[in-house]
Amino acid sequence: MLEKMTRNGGNPLGLSPSLGPLNLVEFAYQWTNEADDARILAVRDEIIAEVEAAAEASGVAVGFLSSNYATNTQDVINSYGLANVNRLKSVARKYDPTGVFQRLWPGYFKLDGPPA
């Protein structure tokens, strides 16, 4: 798939065929007590940090975050790399100069980073 993306100028995700093959990892969590939210989400973030550190230590970390599997605290857009972020912002300024899609689109992953 990455090879096919290069035919039309690449992709804004910062991924190239030379990085592959790649695997995505998704952690699924489920709990019933709302009072546990903060504790569960903190553990989730710790697990993700440990996995990312292990990938870095092993030399296999790519840094890309998939918006399909990322958490609301992860900076998906900036994981695409500075050149791609700048390109996306340039396209947004050209085709959406008033930022309608950034303001009205529900969800976390905006061009200016994750929610605070």
Image (spheres, rainbow, N blue to C red):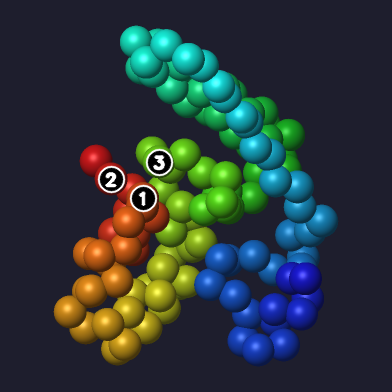
Q: CA distance from mark 3 to mark 2?
A: 7 Å
Which x, y percent locates residue 2?
74, 71
Q: CA distance from mark 2 to mark 1?
A: 6 Å
Q: Quadrant of residue 110?
A: bottom left
Q: Quadrant of the C terminus?
A: top left
Find out whether the residues at labels 2 and 1 contact each other: C-beta distance under 8 Å.
yes
**Residue beneath label 3, please?**
72
Image position of 10 (left or right of 112): right
**Residue beneath label 1, please?**
108
Which x, y percent locates residue 14?
58, 66
> Which amino acid lies under the numbered mark 3 shown in the image of this protein?
Asn
Q: Label 3 neighbourhood size at 10 Å, few (<14), some (14-19), many (20+)?
A: some
**Residue beneath label 2, please?**
115
Q: Earlier in the sequence, mark 2 or mark 1?
A: 1
Image position of 97 (left or right of 66): left
Query: Disc 1 on helix, strand or loop?
Result: loop
Q: Quadrant of the N terminus?
A: bottom right
> Which amino acid lies under the numbered mark 2 shown in the image of this protein?
Pro
Q: Is residue 53 visible?
A: no
Out of 51 and 43, give the one closest to the viewer: 43
Find out whether the residues at labels 3 and 2 contact each other: C-beta distance under 8 Å.
yes
Q: Earlier in the sequence, mark 1 or mark 3?
A: 3
Q: Quadrant of residue 59?
A: top right
Which x, y percent locates residue 63?
57, 49
Residue at horizontal 17 percent and vertical 79 percent from the top: 98
Q: Quadrant of residue 47?
A: top right
> Which amino acid lies under the numbered mark 1 shown in the image of this protein?
Tyr
Image position of 100 (left or right of 19): left
